[in-house]
Amino acid sequence: MFTSAFDFQMTMATVTFFLGLVVLAISIFILVRQAIGRDINTIAKQTAILAEKGITENIAGLVGNASALINALHDLSKTNTGIGVFLVFLGIALLTTAYFISRNLGLTY
């Protein structure tokens, strides 16, 4: 399949570079989607209104469930952001690895 070590390293550098670009694009998509996520904000606002209504009408169960829903939405938001940031660092690491492989081949200065 590979005729020389140069061909193998060149293939490794190319695959690593394109994989880094794909991972970086996915991470940016996740972070942008998280920033634009109006659905979560709408649910949080409606839950806050529901909790206020529960407080004024002395419905303890409603307030507790609304509070649990707000906490779950907050945790969901933190998790998606964490995954996006991790993928950004992974993409940068893959691109850096591709650079050093190609530098070892003498293709970059």
Image: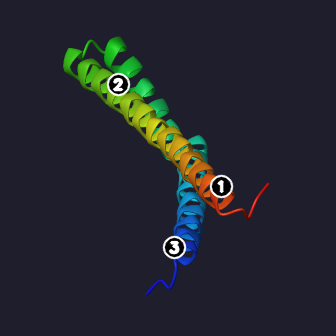
Direction right: furthest residue? 109
Name the quadrant of the C terminus: bottom right
How packed is label 2: few (under 14 Cα within 10 Å), some, or many (20 or more)?
A: few
The amino acid type of the residue labelled 3 equals Ala
Q: Position of residue 59 (x, y in %)?
A: 24, 17
On screen, residue 58 above or below 95: above
Of residue 44 and residue 74, the one placed in the foreground of this image is: 74
Q: Which residue is at the front of the view, 36 or 45?
A: 36
Query: Residue at coordinates 50% horizontally, 85% vertically from top-left?
Result: 3
Front-most of residues 61 and 4: 4
User: For the point 72% across and 62% down, which residue is it?
Assistant: 106
Occupied quadrant, residue 18: bottom right
Identity of the residue drawn at 58% across and 65% down: 13
Give me the disc on residue 71. Answer: 2
Foreground residue among 52 and 9: 9
Check contact, mark 1 vs mark 3: CB within 8 A: no
Q: Which residue is mark 3?
A: 5
Q: Which residue is mark 1?
A: 99
Determine the CA span between mark 1 and mark 3.
Answer: 17 Å
Of the two numbered discs 1 and 2 in the rendering, the one whose residue sits closer to the viewer:
1
Residue 39 spot, x, y in % from top left:
49, 46
**Badge nearest the viewer, 2 or 3:** 3
The earlier-in-sequence mark between 1 and 3 is: 3
Question: Is the residue marked by circle 3 packed among few (<14), some (14-19), or many (20+) residues within 10 Å?
Answer: few
Q: Is residue 37 above or below residue 101?
A: above
Could you tell me the amino acid type at mark 2? Asn
Asked whether the beta carbons under mark 1 and mark 2 sit within 8 Å of each other, the answer is: no
Element carrying mark 3: helix
Question: Which label lies toward us, 1 or 3?
Answer: 3
* Residue appearing at x 49%, y 37% in the figure: 81
Gap in angstroms between the C-alphas marked 2 and 3: 54 Å
Left or right, 50 with reference to 5: left
